[in-house]
Image (cartoon, coloured by chain):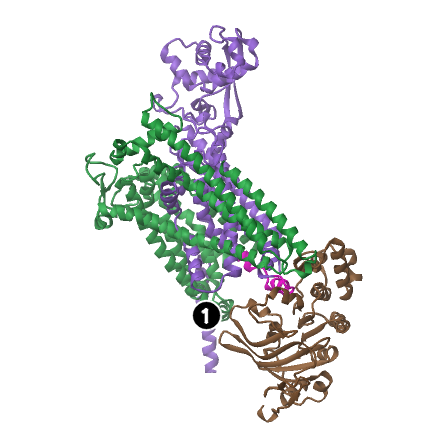
Chain colours: A green, B brown, C purple
Amino acid sequence: MSLTSILLILLGIALLGSFYAKSHVLKMAGSQVTAMHSLPNHHFAYTFLVTLLPSAIVAIIWSLSEQTVIMNLVVGTFPENIQALPADLMSLTMTKFQNFLNGVVFGEPDPWMVASGEAYVSMVSNSRWGATLVSLILAGLGVYWAVSRIEPQFRARNRVETIIKGFLIVCSIVAILTTIGIVVSVLFESIRFFREISIFEFLFGTHWSPMIAMREDQAGSSGSFGAIPLFTGTLLISAIAMSVAIPVGLMSAIYLSEYANQKARSVLKPLLEILAGIPTVVYGFFAALTVAPFLAQNGASLGLDVSTESALAAGIVMGIMIIPFISSLSDDVINSVPQSLRDAAYGLGATRSETIRQVILPAALPGIVGAVLLAVSRAIGETMIVVMAAGVAARLTANPLESVTTVTVQIVKLLIGDQEFDSPKTMAAFALGLTLLVITLCLNIYALHVVRKYREQYD
Amino acid sequence: MTEATMTNEVVEKTGVDRKVPDQTVGNVYVDEPRMTSRAVDVYYGDKQAIDGVTLDIGAQEVISFIGPSGCGKSTFLRCLNRMNDTIDICRVTGEIALDGQNIYDPSIDVVPLRARVGMVFQKPNPFPKSIYDNIAYGPRIHGLATDKVDLDNIVEESLTKAGLWEEVKDRLEQPGTGLSGGQQQRLCIARAMAVSPEVILMDEPCSALDPIATAKVEELIHELREQYTIVIVTHSMQQAARVSNRTAYFHLGKLVEVGETKQIFTNPTHELTQDYITGRFG
Amino acid sequence: MNTHASAASATEVVQQGLDKRYSAESRFKIYGILGISIAMVFLFILMFSILSTGIPAFSKSKILLPFYMDPEVINVEDLADPAAARKINLRKIVNDSKAAFFGATERADKRQLEEVVSTLAQLEVLEHIRANPEDVGQTVELWVTADDEAGRWYKGEVDETLPENRRPLNDQQIEWLKRLTAEERVKTTFNDTFFQGGDSRNPEQAGILAALKGSFLTLIVTLGLSFPVGVAAAVYLEEFAPKNRFTDLVEVNINNLAAVPSIIFGLLGLAVFLNIFGMPRSAPVVGGLVLTLMTLPTIIISSRAALRAVPPSIKDAALGLGASPMQTVFHHVVPLALPGMLTGTIIGLAQALGETAPLLMIGMVAFIVDVPQGFTDASSVLPVQIYLWSDSAERAFVEKTSGGIIVLLMFLIAMNAMAVLLRKKFERRW
């Protein structure tokens, strides 16, 4: 039986059991609802949950793990000479076997394959029966358990609420699981990478060319993995982005919060928000289609040699993307400076700009620094703009007119397309991911800390 | 305070010693109490908000709690149906009993407790639902109505008791938030009555109302005293004098004096009560 | 007298400094205006460049050509059966007909005609002849799709001043196209192929339906998981969680997750969902899972804000009536916070819809021709399709890319407008 039909049957059992439980408890209480601890519907819900939850969870886990378990068992039925194959040949054989199971056969299948195939089929059908039987028994036990406990004074509502609360807790743990998943998945591959390539070579090496294999059979030799050019490239592009975004974003925020009238604000703020809502792939296309050719042409007419994948183009567009981020955060920060400070300055006869420069900005500075740090972390982690507009070749340069590559670009390039999973190439992507994660996380934690300190000051 | 302290011992028919605590003057005990509190302390974190309050609340009486702001009268009121449970840092010690049963006993479920001890709040807080649904909510969650007709009856009865029926019977489906402030507060009282509580706690029920609406609510309290035990916290001494038959005066978390309302307002024993009544502070 | 004089001089000093201060004032204001103007100019240039290159993607050029339905090639019996009809050598019909029309006899000339008429013409001829079998043996005038390069020429996008060898169309081909115009055999129609089918190597055949469907399926998964989980987590943290180290940890966690670069979520998906759980590559279900984890922090944070905005007096009222905390929250607080939570969810989904990088990691960059039918079919999504097209060499893909971006932006605008409306409609002042 398929998982869907098992689940449907379980649902049916749970519903029937719950209706029975409800009428049962009503009969016991002589239809005197006020004499009962919980409403009949709570008894219904209790029976329903107790019946459905365990059996459905077992059924789902069973069918999710079924494939892996059966495959492992089937390998045991292979002839010994096949089981003794080296790992790479074995995986090839497994693919062949998988194809055979899916009905894709080239020529006459080997006899052992037919035998193991039959074993596979019978195991699958046994497993299906097992899943059905076990979950049905669990559902039956659930109904029995619930009905036997139910009586008018039974605290069904409290039980149901405990179960719901359990669900709520599980949902809030998802966030922690995600973090653990991220850390583990990135760390695990990175450690394997650092076993083959020294961490010092990775962090301080100046030559990055992971794609060029020197010799096919050489272990860990698909290239050199010195990530310094990537780091400098990332820094260069982020620096260009910030030098666009900080002045424009900050001045926009100051204008919007201190100068603009209500009408101008109501038009300009949503327009800035549009800038924030544009997907990064659009910015990337804009950089590659409009900005880069524009810079290259104008550079040429000025006698400059501007690469079509220049760091400048990617950086400027990334800066545009970050403008609304900086301006909305700074706007918040500036608005949380108390009115009394402004009044004090105005009362002394300061002009508006003097008030802003000498009173508001110094007061808001920690908050603005926090906002800028958050923006930097976003720039470092940005992917699509640089994938589409920056280069692939790792070059150690500080010249914004040349093409550089970044950490995120390399992650994408290493993992897109056909990948051999265990090669240092793919593991290198995870090591880069780890670096990226550590840097952005540190920036964020520090920035959030600065912002929180700032908020507390005026609360 | 010490010089005014006096101890009077009352030996009841049962023969149990009923000692009035040092901090309080007046008779804290009644013959057939509905609710009793014994040496109740309440802490918010490290701060003590209520200090050793012992007080009986009789059946079918209206008792008012008065005292200056921050004296703990609202805190004590919220202890009576465990509304303080919602505040994490709040801790209650001592014993509060409803019909002889300690409501802070771990085996007590607060849900039926609050159905028996209802509450009306300072600011009218109707649910943003229809007038009908506001009243019907309590009976629904407690399963008090067997069918729609029954529920309709409960709604009509409660609104009638609250003197609101004539005003709203044609617009039961309109949102309760659309009523005037006084009507909203009477709606909240009706909502509390719809679950047939034994005790109704009112936390400054008129503080957000104008004098005319206040008069209507006071009139309502007057009528309700026949059926319910009402505990009312108020800032207005006139109101306490008008609606209650007993009055308790709180000061800095302590119950200073309790007695017949007439006696408290005409002839207070404790110096602090006297100061408050005569308007020297408060 | 003396003090009077010094007071007067103080006023004078202030007066003297005023001009300088006021000019500083206006300079500063100009910087502010400059800042906001630069941002607006960027927005304008971006929108203009996307729109001007993208609008042509929604139209296509059709040309009217006579086709000789050669009875030796088309077997009338085959037409009824779709499988047999597909085997008809339509290529010959189209090639012979267009060669005859343009008078191309040389092999080289015939090859040049490929840049004039799209291969879609074969399908269009087949469609016509299946609907009208009586036309076999006749010569029929049919509107067929022009090739992408011809289409760009008709839209005026080919620079004729370039030397012949640097132009996509040579003089001979342009001659033919001009002849078609002169004979009024050219028309521009709505590009319906763009909204049908999937990716193609031929720009004039490439469509976004497959990517749209992929995005739709992915978002369904994201919505189905992230909304309940996000709301449940928010409800727990805001209404039930005790204040202790564990809940602090969860909070810090959520704030940091919100700032983790999206590509890292892609690495998570690749390592955990694909390699450990063995889920299918390029599938909407995996994309949806990754985007769920990515949007959860957004949804949780905005849902908590919405829950916090519900006044405590409502909670008191319900609790005072004897509702349990769970009943209070689910009967009163959650319904009142729902519009706010939905707004947050829609904004989170809009982010997810525009997200590209993590999906590249889990293999959603495959070349997808067929419209995906289920959650486990290989599929692409709209932003990834845009990325793929932008990477293609043919010039005509530029307009497809911009066209795709316009469609994507339409959806984003619609979603954000929905969020704004929802907020406006249910905004409550307490």
The stretch of residues the image draws in magenta is C305-323
Picture residue at 53% right of the left edge, 58% below the top: A162
Element under disc 1? helix
Q: Please name the predominant secondary structure of the magenta segment in the image.
A: helix
Q: Crowdedness of circle 1 by 10 Å Cα count: few (<14), some, many (20+)?
A: few
Indicate the position of residue A82 as horizontal and vertical percent values. 27, 31
Is residue B45 placed above or below C352 in the rendered structure? below
Indicate the position of residue B117 as horizontal and vertical percent values. 66, 69
Residue A48 or C193: which is nearer the viewer? A48
Is residue A208 placed above or below A100 in the rendered structure? below
Q: Residue furthest bottom?
A: B3
Indicate the position of residue C314 as horizontal and vertical percent values. 62, 62
Q: Residue furthest right?
A: B166
Three-letter amino acid code of the residue under disc 1: Val
Is residue C97 placed above or below A293 in the rendered structure? above
Left or right: residue C250 compared with residue B205 = left
Picture residue at 47% right of the left edge, 65% below the top: C243
Would you identify the image quadrant in which residue B85 lies? bottom right
Indicate the position of residue A53 as horizontal and vertical percent values. 52, 48
Picture residue at 70% right of the left edge, 63% below the top: B195
Q: Residue tagged by mark 1?
A: C14
Left or right: residue B218 compared with residue A101 = right
Is residue C315 placed above or below C33 in the rendered structure? below
| Magenta region includes residue C229 | no
- Is residue B107 visible in the rendered image? The answer is yes
